[in-house]
Amino acid sequence: MKKTGQALKKFEQLMESVKNLSEEETRAVREGLSEEQLAVFDLLKKPELSARERKKIKEIAVVLPDTLKAEPLRVDKRREKRASAAEAESYIYDYLFASLPVEYSDAESGEKAEFVFSHIYQQYPEIYDSVYAAI
């Protein structure tokens, strides 16, 4: 009986934690993404995605932020280094044009690349300093 009581107590604690999650945190958990990945997912998705397209967009949302923080693009004080920002922007464009589902037109892919680059530029003033660092 003691184990059942402990399990019930843990379950109640978990339910209380779930109640305290923000709407975005709840969406992130539901989607199986971090908040950082969810932001990229939201920028890339479009209305009425098929299950296959949705899965592909999620994969991109998981890979892209980590790739951008990897060594080849890791540059401190990126805002002050135009070449580095241009390299990151070019990488995002190339990656999305190659990775987005074929149902995305070239214009849509370009638009999504601009959205993601703007988001990265705003949310990561320095590679180690982002709004997601505390999450």
Image: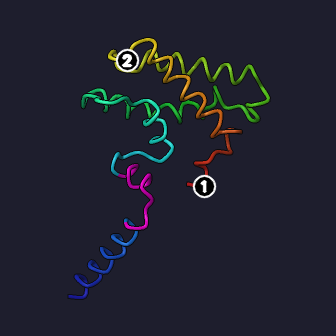
Assess whether residue 25 is covered by the magenta stretch.
Answer: yes
Percent of width and height locating residue 112: 48, 24
* SS assignment for the magenta stretch, majority: helix
Percent of width and height locating residue 128: 68, 43
Percent of width and height locating residue 15: 33, 70
Marker count (numbered): 2
Percent of width and height locating residue 36: 51, 43
Q: Secondary structure at mark 1?
A: loop
Q: Residue furthest left?
A: 1
Q: Secondary structure at mark 2?
A: loop
Badge 2, how many Cα within 10 Å: few under 14, some, many 20+?
some
Residue occupying the point 25% across, 88% down = 2
Mark 2 or 1: in front is 2
User: Could you give the CA–CA distance between mark 2 and mark 1, rounded to whole angstroms?
Assistant: 33 Å
Q: Residue furthest top?
A: 106
Left or right: 35 as drawn, with respect to 131: left
Residue occupying the point 28% across, 29% down = 48
- The image shows residue 89, relative to residue 5, as above or below, that is above
Q: Amino acid at mark 2?
A: Tyr
Q: Which residue is mark 1?
A: 134
Q: Which residue is mark 2?
A: 104
Residue occupying the point 60% across, 34% down = 120
Q: Amino acid at mark 1?
A: Ala
Q: Which label was assigned to residue 7? A: none
Which span of residues is magenta-colored? 19-29
